[in-house]
Amino acid sequence: MDTEVGMSSFIDEISDFWGAPYKSIPIPAERYEKYRGIVPDLLLEVWRNFGFSGFQDGAVWLCDPDAWQPIVDAWTANLSLATGPDEWLAVTRTAFGHMTLWGRRTGMSLHIVPYRGWIVFDDCSAEMGTGEDRDIQVQAALWTMSSEYAEVIGDDEKPLFPRLLKDLGPIDADTVYGFVPAPALGGAMIPRAAEILDANSYLQLLNEVTGRTVMAENPYN
């Protein structure tokens, strides 16, 4: 995975898996230098090819780490893990705000599921030894990005994404499907309570009103 041929092959395969971007957002050129040496080389190559784009009708997105950093900082503030502190940035997210984070020390080890208040930690620090090790972590995370992975089952025990897409239309790079009132405030996760909301405002609100639960196993949804 640390060779140009390996990266090119992965880009082709993941492009076939994701399909064409629902919305293409080019990455600013200076972003490559800012994050070179901070994120795996494979992630830089993914950004170069896809930008910070959404796929599968906006079910899954590649995150602009700068834009999502305030949300990441809010959810990881005062987070106590056995591995100690880390520096986190958002790599992917779903239409509902479920984020996958890269840690400079622990790799692709943290999932944040804001609408549940879950912080799921799977320590990958033992897999940080080489550039290839780090690239493999990115590869594994990106292979999970699909509409099935991103789906959320509503309180009516039915999948929410296709219904919200039909009722509300698609989200954008800076919005999410949210629920008003928030689930932590007694709101229901059902279509008639759903709105398209500013991602930063809504996910920071969820951080304020939703109790955090640190988990060792990832139920994803």
Image: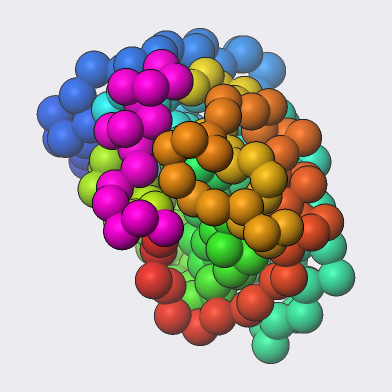
x then y, percent, for residue 172? 52, 19
Q: Nearer the viewer, residue 186 or 80?
A: 186
Image point (45%, 45%), residue name: 190
x then y, percent, for residue 21? 31, 18
Location of the C terminus by quadrant is bottom left
Residue 92 visible: no
Q: Can residue 167 be found in the magenta stretch?
A: yes
Q: Is residue 58 above or below residue 151?
A: above
- Quarter of the figure with residue 13: top left
Q: Is residue 187 above or below residue 34?
A: below
Q: Is residue 220 above or below residue 3?
A: below
Q: Is residue 72 above or below residue 178?
A: below
Image point (72%, 52%), residue name: 206
x then y, percent, for residue 124? 49, 73
Q: Nearer the viewer, residue 7 or 142?
A: 142
Left or right of 145 on screen, residue 173: right
* Residue lying farthest to the bottom in this orientation: 82
Left or right of 209 on screen, residue 150: left
Q: Can residue 68 be found in the magenta stretch?
A: no
Image point (42%, 73%), residue name: 218
Range of magenta residues: 155-170
- Quarter of the figure with residue 210: bottom right
Residue 78 visible: yes
Left or right of 119 on screen, residue 203: right
